[in-house]
Amino acid sequence: MGSVCIEIVEGNPHLRSLLGWHLQQLEYKIHQAASIYQAREVFLSHQPTLVILDADLADSDSIEFCRWLHRQDQPLILMLSARTNESDIVAGLKAGADDYLRKPFGMQEFLARVEALVRRKRTPTAPAFLDYGTLQIDLVQRRVRFQGEFIDLTPQEFSLLYVLAQAGGVPLSRSELLRRAWPDAIDNPRTIDTHVLSLRKKVELDPRQPNLIQTIRNVGYRFNMEILNTHVSPIPNKLVKERFANQIPVLS
């Protein structure tokens, strides 16, 4: 847990010190602040993963500070408060708090909530949809829309296109593409060439002079991200009408 930094913003010095001590026993890195002014300075200096925020600070508006935190790099926020009205809890959660703990609370419950929030940060939810402008990849239904039209891809073509696009324009070798895009170990790198050729027939205006999936000499292939910002479809209009008349989804 030593890599996780936590900021404690608490007006009560005894409680602030007690919380910090218990968290340090779990090997969290701890920084403390007694006011909103100090809290801003600490946050900007240390960029904590989790901010434990006293909602009852006397010197400023904790709710507004919570909104400010949420607009930053979206740290996790655990709000502590002696206020027990439902409206106060709702206000804190709407301001960006990830959890709300009422005072007084037991130390074991406090530590459990901290650990639960940290686990959430460490295991982010995988995206279900990738948007590259004129290219959208639906990872759940395994469908691809390019230039506003669905493209009928085989499962392996889908995986290859996804890996190339996710690389963000960085060239990938044939062996790297095999490792990332193929479910089984394959020793023949030329398998990539065959699938790239079939993929180009579906997304390129002229597969013999490809603009989207480019060959990089002595390396492999790269996805041309720049073309995604253009408004000219790389697929001939005739092919668009024929291929996408029924907007056939990708086979899963």
Image: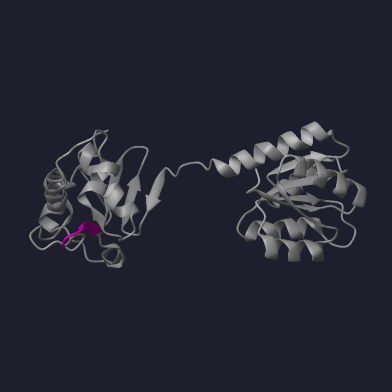
Q: Is residue 203 above or below residue 15?
A: below
Quadrant into which the C terminus falls? top left
Q: Is residue 80 left or right of residue 2?
A: right
Q: Is residue 6 left or right of residue 184?
A: right
**What residue is rendered at 24% in x and 58% in y?**
222
Q: Position of residue 119 (x, y in %)?
A: 61, 39
Total residue callouts: 0
Q: Is residue 163 above or below residue 223?
A: above
**What residue is rendered at 86% in x and 58% in y?**
34
Q: Nearer the viewer, residue 99 or 42?
A: 42
**What residue is rendered at 66% in x and 36% in y?**
116
**Which quadrant of the view contains residue 180?**
top left
Q: Position of residue 90 (x, y in %)?
A: 74, 44
What are the residue bounds of the magenta stretch? 217-222
Residue reaching furthest left? 208
**What residue is rendered at 91% in x and 52% in y?**
13
Q: Nearer the viewer, residue 222 or 96?
A: 222
Q: Position of residue 62 (x, y in %)?
A: 80, 56
Is residue 236 highlighted in magenta?
no
Q: Is residue 206 above or below residue 153?
A: below
Q: Position of residue 167 (x, y in %)?
A: 33, 55
Quadrant into which the N terminus falls? top right
Q: Give the color scheme: rainbow, by chain, secondary structure or one colour.
A: one colour
